[in-house]
Amino acid sequence: MDRLSGFEAVFRDPVGQVVQQRWADAATAVAFEELSPVSAFPVIPGRRWGPGLWWSATTGRHVAAGSNAMRARLMALDRNPEVTGLAGRPVRLLWHERRGRVRSWVPQLFARYRNGTALLADCPSHAGAGGERALAAAEAVSAACEEIGWTYRRLPPLDDVLAANLKWLAGYRHPRNQQRPGLMPAVLEAFTHPRPLLEGAEAAGDPLEVLPALFHALWHGQLTTNLNAPLHEHILVGLRDQSGPAKRGGAG
């Protein structure tokens, strides 16, 4: 790749017009996390899970997702307290090879961090997904991100147990699961010291009312547990470490 030729960014502005701009300028000025996909996710015949939308607890908006592997990574990033924005396929990068041929790539995922930096990522179903073209594009996009202080990653699939736990907790991510006023403080107080999940739920009140709030608190990191082990009624749950930010897990 001829680095002297630079990178270009192609994206849809807030009114849907396609814009092409120097990459370094776009990265500074454009809020990619607020943009719609620059191109649709492909529909691949035979796959059990196709393109869809993920409702983000971080932004309160839907994010386009193109695969089950990407949705799992969106779940993880949506729980990361350092992430402030998410978008699916908001930008296409263009660059020239040494022989002058124009190449392009649309990373699947964009995440904005609290410090203003960002992550561009792809979510392959396995290490070799996409073949040589995807690996060559990964090298180019990584270089483009490095130039501006961002990061590009090919994020591997989540562990099956972690993915299943996140999927379960994600069902309680919406604010409505905080339940009635005053319940959440009681739930958190019940786990001042780590104790089994169901034991703490019963200590806070009627488990039918408490459990949605408990799972909501686990999703948002107010409570913590080992999400690399299957969730069950006896798993130990406790308050997060109050000395630092919530550590909700995830990638990036």
Image (cartoon, rainbow, N blue to C red):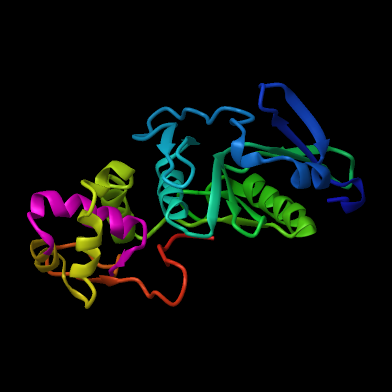
- Give whichever of 105, 167 is nearer the camera: 167
Q: In this view, does 178 lie above or below 11?
A: below
Residue furthest right in the image: 4
Q: In which quarter of the image is residue 67?
A: top left
Expressed as whole percent of the image width and height from the top left, the position of residue 28 reads 77, 47
Q: Can residue 160 be seen in this view?
A: no
Residue 210 part of the magenta segment: yes
Please give the range of residues in magenta.
204-225
Q: Is residue 248 above or below residue 194?
A: above
Expressed as whole percent of the image width and height from the top left, the position of residue 115 reads 64, 60
**Residue at 80% from the left image edge and 57% from the top image edge:** 147
Query: Residue 3 vs residue 212: left or right?
Result: right
- Give whichever of 215, 164 is nearer the camera: 215
**Residue at 47% from the left image edge and 36% from the top image edge:** 61
Expressed as whole percent of the image width and height from the top left, the position of residue 117 reads 67, 56
Query: Residue 53 vs residue 92: left or right?
Result: left
User: The C terminus is located in which quarter?
Assistant: bottom right
